[in-house]
Structure formats: C-alpha cells, structure tokens
Image (cartoon, rainbow, N blue to C red):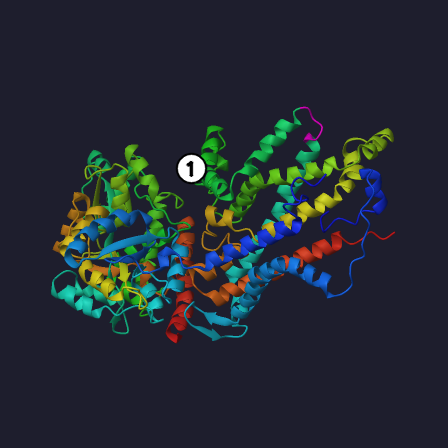
C-alpha cells in the first residue's frame, strides 16, 4: 500500500521537497519586495515615522489644520521599541526607503545622525517660525550642528514636580518657593506616612532626572558647562548636588528606586502619593488614567540658594526631514507649518502638554499654570541630560547614577562622580575625534 | 527512511512485509546521482550559508572597524583591546559564568530529581504537570511575573512580612550577586519543566529488565539510581546538559526584562553587553567584537563538551 502522505503517486518526497523549496524561494523574494510603508505615500500626504504609537490621534488632529493650511496631511507610522526605532531610522534615513518626516531627539543625539548628512537643513524654516513668534530662538541651538538646523521642535516638555493637591491640602503644605520649602514639604509628607518623592530609575533612563535637576538648582551655568565638556564632574557644584541627593535619601524622602511612574495613579487613589519630579508629557498619561486638575498640580524645583537663577530642564523632540524623503518639499512645508499656533493648539490639545509655541496652550489647567509660571519668571532653560552630551557618555553615566540610587551613600556619590568624569574624558575624546 | 537511519537489511524488509522485494537496480555510476544529491542539499546549504555563515563572517570583519552605522574606519584589534580592558566586560563574563553553573545545578539537577522521583509515583503525573506548566509560558511573560514578585515591596517581600520574616526582606533585583541568583531561580521555575520532559523520555527508554535485574541483586534507592538508572540516562543527560550550557551562555531576555543588566552593568551578561554596544550605543564594531567572543565561547564550550561526551566507547 502506498504511503498515505508521501508515498503515493500524487506527492512523492521529491515533489514535496521541490514544492517546499519553491515556496521558500517565493517567500524570500516576497520578503525582498518593497512594502507599502517604504513607498511614496498617497498624494496630499506625507509619511512620518515615530517611536510613540499612542500619538496617532494627535497627528490626525494636527493634520486637519495642516490640510487646511497647506493641503497636506501626516500619515504616521510607529515602531514601539525605542531601540528598534533608532536602528530603523539609522538604516532607512540613508536610503529612499525612509519616511518623509522622522521623529528624533534634539541635542547630541541629533548631532550624531546629522554628521552623516542624511537630514535637511531647516534654518530657513526656523527663520520663518522665529519671525512669526512661533518659537523661541534660544531653542534653535539644540537643533543645530555646524551652523545647520536639522529639525524643528516636535514637542516641548518641562521637568517639574507633579504633586498631590489632596496630600498638600490635608497636611497644610504650600507649593514650595524655595529649596528649603521643598525639603520641608517632603519632611511633612514623610511625617504623615506618605513617601515624599516617587523616584524611579534604578535600571532606567529616569536615573538622570534628580541629578540634572539638582545640578540645575545648584548652578545652571555649571550644568551647561559640564554637559558640553566645559567643566569636570568632580567640581564642587556636582559634589554639592550629590551630597544633597544623598542626604535626601538618608532622610527617607525617596521611594525605592525600582518603582515605576505608572504606580502614580494608583498611589493617588490610595492617598499615598506625595510628589514626583518628571516630564510634563506624563500629564497625558495621568489624564488618560482619570486624574484631573483637582488631583494633581505642577511646580518648578526652586534654586538651591536665593542668589542662583531659577532653571528648568527642557525636553524636546525633533521633527526632521531626511534628504532622501520621497516628498521632501512637502515635508519641509509641513515642518514650516508645524509650529503655527493653530496646528500646535490641535497638537497639544491631544498631548495635554506645553508647546514650543508659547501661544499654544492645552485645554487642561494642569500644564497651563506651569506654562504661565515659566512665562512670568523666565527661568534658564536647560536641555535635558539625555540629549545634552554624546550618547555613550550619557548612557554610561545614567547607568552609574542608577547604581547610586540603589546605594545612595556619600561615598558612593563621590565614586559615581569619579566614574562619570573618567567616562567623560574618554567619550569627549572620541566625539571630538570623529 | 530518514537520512540518519542506517540502511535496512534487505532480508528484514522481506520478513516484515511478506512481499517479494523490488529488484535492486544498481545506481548508475556517473555525475547524475551527485548532482541530484547536491540539488537536494543546496537549499539547506544556501540557507545556512546566507543566514549563518555569511553574517558571522561579516560580523568578524565588522569587529575590526570603528563603525557607527554611517561611517566605518579600520581600527584593527582596538575593539577587542577595549573590550578586554573594560571592567564591565569582566563583570559580564563573571555573570555569564554564574548563569552556566546556575542553570546546570538548578534546572538540570532539579529536572533530573523530579523526573526520577516522580516517575513511578501514583500522583507523579500531577506533580510533573505542575512543574512542566511554567514551561508553556513565554520568557517575557515569566519576566513580568517575576518582576512583580521580586521588586521592592513586591510579592515576595509581602509574603515574607506576612510570615514575620522581615529580616529576609531584600532588594532582590537591585543588589549583586543576589539579583543574578534570583534571575537564575526565576529561569529555573520556567526551564525545569523542559528538563523533566527530556529526562522522562530518557527514563522510558531504559529497558525494565536491567532495573529488575538490579533490584533482584538487592539494589534499591540511591544505589539503584546511581549505579543503574543514571548511567543509562547518559545519552539524554548529554543532550540536556549541552542545551543548558549553550542556553545559559547566550541568556538575554530574562536579564533584559528583569534588571536591564543593572543597576549599572552589575547583572549584565555577554549577550546584553553585545546588545548594549550595538543597539543602545550604536557602536557596531564593538558590538561585533563581543558577538565574536560570545560565539567563540559558545562553540568552544559545546565542542569541548560534546567531543568529550560523544567519544565512542573503546572496547
């Protein structure tokens, strides 16, 4: 009797192998074909690649306004993994498989890919936007490399303290206006059995947050200098910042370093949340979790002494146009109009965050009050640590800071600064030689 | 007949089937059979060459360059020198060694103990099912569960406090080497099931007559296991240990998801170092150097182990 599967007349082993081989070959050829995501987009649209899949509705809202202004809409696509996204952009932006617009970061991470001449110079767009009052000229520097601006601000967030209005009211705490007030507020919360600061970062990028803020509060000029190879990590301001951070840990002001920011809404509902220093972009998550302006407020971390200028750390993504974009002119036109007040109002209306355009404010009072405070006090705006120095230096130093958060002793603080300084010497040498 | 089976004697075919065999036609000598063989081998050879050999050769080539994905310049052995002089790399090698020893002692040892211990028990199937069940869960899901268990004030700390064992409460994932040990235990929870299955297959292949003969001779318990059962499990033990060594040398997902190699680089393994250099820092040359080192270690360890274990017994 013939084998019911392979041994019959219809399908011999050779036939099966030949069919399998042909199928494999066809699949391989199909895989080599160009996908719809890498072909030119439909007329009237430009494509945008991003690493944030939840921002689609925001791009749609902004597109409605863009379409009315210039006749182009944004078709967004995203890669959720930041590591994968970075690699995809590094590879595709060199080829005509790129999207017309890409989301990137500003600062040294933008400079890193700008060196490869794969992005379009948008200085003309900046001139136009600054002239119309759509963006602060001071921001241009963090998007510029060797005189060319390789992106416009996609968004603008500040690092500020989220605080529980309920916890503050119940414990008679006023919004701190000095650093001592901040420490005093933390002590009051601790006495009320509320962990004063939710502070993630043991093994994540968040380890940078308190370090950069404390440096900014000690001496904003030093922060700008140390992140651009103009000062040493073992100088006095850095030592002072680490000592303050260590003493705040010793006073029990911080949560365990392996908490996550996503714990915040739960802690608020349990009445156990006090404060968290974080990017204002996180407001969107909190609003989505059902929290309102009545639950949460924001304030800037005050300077360490009265003689120090107030400073705030700024995070800003970059909207960049690859040189090989299919619809490059249209993409530049979108970048030119991205900062327009009506487009930004639609965009931050979705984000619930501040905008690079000072005239565009979200509907939520959560961020509006902070934006008004910043407009009134005009603090020094410092680029976030993540983008403020070459990537390998920042990544290594943030790992060191994560280790410090696990063992936050004064001695560990000193050894952390020494390690950061040693890495800075190596990495700046590499960066300057490239 | 598969390619790995020995040729079946013609008499056996006759005896089993009862039909007269098809007359054997001698294969024509010449190039045709060779060409047919080559054609059948070609897909596999091409796939291996394209997907394994070629990328590996390119990785070796790339490890001699300073490569940021945009520009590439020849640096000779600099990437290897930097790798071997980096203290984080030494820590990574040490952690990888921990993983090799840990996964040999725990999942393999426990798998053997559970398979042998529950083999002939009445409710053994139930016990084995409980052990094997986590094997069905993906590595990522396992890491999520264990993150919940091992984070500060997580499941384990809560349980310890409930039992009045407050002094044992720890930062399980934040202190080295405790975090590496806990990750090995988490992996043991998941991987032991696979070892149990393989050892059970091995146990079922032992002829009952040898065990009965040993029992008639008075062997039982530990002595029966050590002198009779375990030696007959040798082929399966070789496979399980071999898989375990290779798996532990390239461990990645559990560490990435539970500690991200941190704090700092305290719990990083070689695979994570390779990932960090390549995908986080975009230093493709340095990442390639770690990849080459890891490959050499995996191949050398596998070759040394299998060469020793699979040596034909001398009569």
A403 displayed left or right of B195: left
Specify start and end residues of the magenta stretch as a single range: B118-122
A394 displayed left or right of A358: right
Residue at 44% in and 38% down: B148
Most common secondary structure along the magenta stretch: loop
Query: The disc numbered 1 marks a residue on which chain?
Result: B
Q: Is residue A259 visible?
A: yes
Q: Is residue B94 magenta?
A: no
Q: Which of the image's four quarters has the C terminus of chain A?
A: bottom left
Q: Position of residue B272 (x, y in %)?
A: 50, 55
The picture quadrant where one finds residue A240 is bottom left
Q: Position of residue A351 (x, y in %)?
A: 23, 48
Q: Is residue B120 magenta?
A: yes
The picture quadrant where one finds residue A233 is bottom left
Q: Position of residue A143 (x, y in %)?
A: 26, 65
Query: Could you say which is closer to the camera, residue B288 or residue B70?
Result: B70
The crowding category of the residue bearing disc 1, from other C-alpha atoms within 10 Å (few below 14, some 14 to 19, many at least 20), is many
Query: Could you say which is closer to the camera, residue A217 or residue B280?
Result: B280
Residue at the far front in the pictured view = A9
Query: Could you say which is closer to the camera, residue B212 or residue A108?
Result: B212
Q: Which of the image's four quarters has the N terminus of chain A?
A: top right
Residue at 81% in and 43% down: B13
Q: Position of residue B135 (x, y in %)?
A: 56, 38
Residue under label 1, please give it: B153
Query: Could you say which is closer to the camera, residue B33 or residue A212?
Result: B33
Q: Secondary structure at mark 1?
A: loop
B262 displayed left or right of B96: left
Q: Is residue A267 above or below residue A343?
A: above
Q: Is residue B110 visible?
A: no
């Amino acid at each position: 009797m013939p084998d019911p599967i392979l041994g019959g007349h219809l399908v011999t082993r050779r036939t099966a192998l030949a069919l399998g081989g042909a199928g494999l070959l066809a699949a391989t050829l199909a895989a080599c074909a160009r996908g719809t995501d890498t072909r030119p987009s439909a007329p009237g649209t430009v494509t945008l690649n991003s690493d944030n899949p939840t921002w689609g509705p925001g791009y749609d809202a902004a597109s409605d306004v863009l379409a009315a202004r210039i006749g182009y809409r944004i078709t967004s696509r995203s890669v959720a993994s930041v590591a994968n996204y970075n690699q995809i952009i590094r590879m595709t932006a060199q080829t005509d498989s790129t999207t017309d617009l890409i989301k990137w970061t500003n600062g040294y991470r933008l400079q890193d890919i700008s060196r490869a001449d794969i992005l379009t110079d948008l200085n003309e767009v900046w001139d136009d936007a600054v002239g119309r009052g759509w963006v602060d000229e001071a921001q241009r520097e963090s998007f510029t490399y060797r005189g060319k601006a390789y992106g416009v601000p996609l968004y603008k967030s500040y690092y500020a303290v989220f605080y529980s209005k309920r916890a503050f009211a119940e414990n008679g705490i006023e919004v701190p206006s000095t650093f001592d007030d901040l420490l005093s507020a933390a002590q009051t919360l601790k006495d009320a059995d509320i962990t004063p600061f939710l502070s993630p970062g043991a093994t994540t990028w968040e380890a940078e947050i308190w370090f950069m803020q404390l440096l900014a509060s000690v001496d904003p000029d030093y922060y700008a200098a140390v992140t651009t190879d103009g000062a040493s990590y073992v100088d006095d301001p850095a030592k002072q910042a680490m000592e303050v951070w260590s003493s705040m840990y010793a006073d029990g002001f911080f949560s365990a370093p392996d908490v996550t920011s996503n714990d915040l809404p739960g802690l608020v509902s349990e009445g156990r949340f006090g404060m968290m220093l974080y990017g204002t972009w996180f407001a969107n998550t909190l609003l989505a979790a059902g929290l309102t302006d009545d639950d949460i407020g924001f304030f800037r971390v005050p300077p360490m002494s009265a003689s120090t200028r107030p400073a705030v750390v700024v995070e800003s993504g970059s909207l960049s146009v690859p040189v090989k974009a299919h619809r490059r002119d249209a993409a530049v036109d979108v970048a030119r109009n991205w900062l327009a007040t009506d487009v930004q109002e639609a965009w931050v209306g979705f984000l619930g965050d501040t905008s690079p355009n000072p005239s565009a404010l979200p509907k939520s009072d959560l961020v509006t009050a902070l934006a008004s405070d910043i407009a009134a006090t005009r603090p020094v705006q410092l680029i976030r640590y993540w983008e403020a120095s070459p990537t390998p230096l920042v990544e290594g130093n943030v790992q060191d800071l994560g280790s410090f958060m696990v063992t936050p002793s004064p001695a560990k603080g000193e050894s952390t600064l020494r390690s950061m300084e040693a890495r800075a010497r190596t990495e700046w040498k590499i960066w300057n030689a490239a | 007949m598969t390619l790995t089976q020995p040729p079946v004697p013609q008499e056996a075919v006759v005896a089993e089937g009862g039909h007269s065999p098809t007359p054997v036609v001698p294969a024509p000598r010449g190039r045709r059979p060779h060409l047919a063989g080559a054609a059948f081998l070609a897909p596999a050879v091409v796939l291996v060459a394209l997907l394994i050999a070629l990328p590996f050769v390119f990785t070796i080539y790339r490890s001699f360059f300073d490569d940021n994905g945009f520009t590439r310049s020849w640096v000779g052995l600099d990437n290897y020198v930097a790798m071997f002089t980096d203290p984080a790399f030494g820590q990574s090698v040490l952690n990888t060694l921990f993983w090799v020893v840990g996964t040999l002692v725990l999942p393999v040892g426990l798998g053997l103990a559970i398979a042998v211990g529950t083999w002939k028990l009445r409710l053994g199937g139930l016990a084995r099912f409980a052990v094997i069940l986590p094997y069905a869960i993906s590595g990522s899901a396992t890491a999520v569960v264990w993150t919940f268990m091992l984070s500060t004030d997580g499941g384990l700390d809560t349980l310890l406090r409930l039992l009045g064992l407050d002094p044992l409460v720890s930062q399980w994932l934040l202190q080295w080497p405790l975090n590496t040990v806990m990750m090995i235990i988490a992996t043991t929870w998941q991987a032991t099931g696979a070892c149990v299955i393989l050892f059970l297959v091995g146990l079922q292949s032992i002829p009952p007559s040898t065990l009965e003969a040993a029992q008639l001779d008075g062997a039982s318990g530990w002595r029966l296991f050590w002198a009779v059962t375990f030696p007959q499990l040798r082929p399966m033990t070789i496979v399980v240990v071999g898989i375990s060594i290779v798996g532990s040398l390239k461990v990645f997902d559990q560490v990435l998801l539970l500690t991200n190699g941190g704090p700092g680089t305290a719990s990083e393994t070689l695979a994570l170092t390779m990932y960090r250099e390549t995908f986080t820092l975009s230093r493709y040359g340095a990442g390639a150097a770690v990849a080459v080192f890891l490959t050499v270690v995996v191949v050398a360890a596998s070759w040394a182990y299998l060469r020793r274990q699979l040596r034909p017994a001398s009569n």
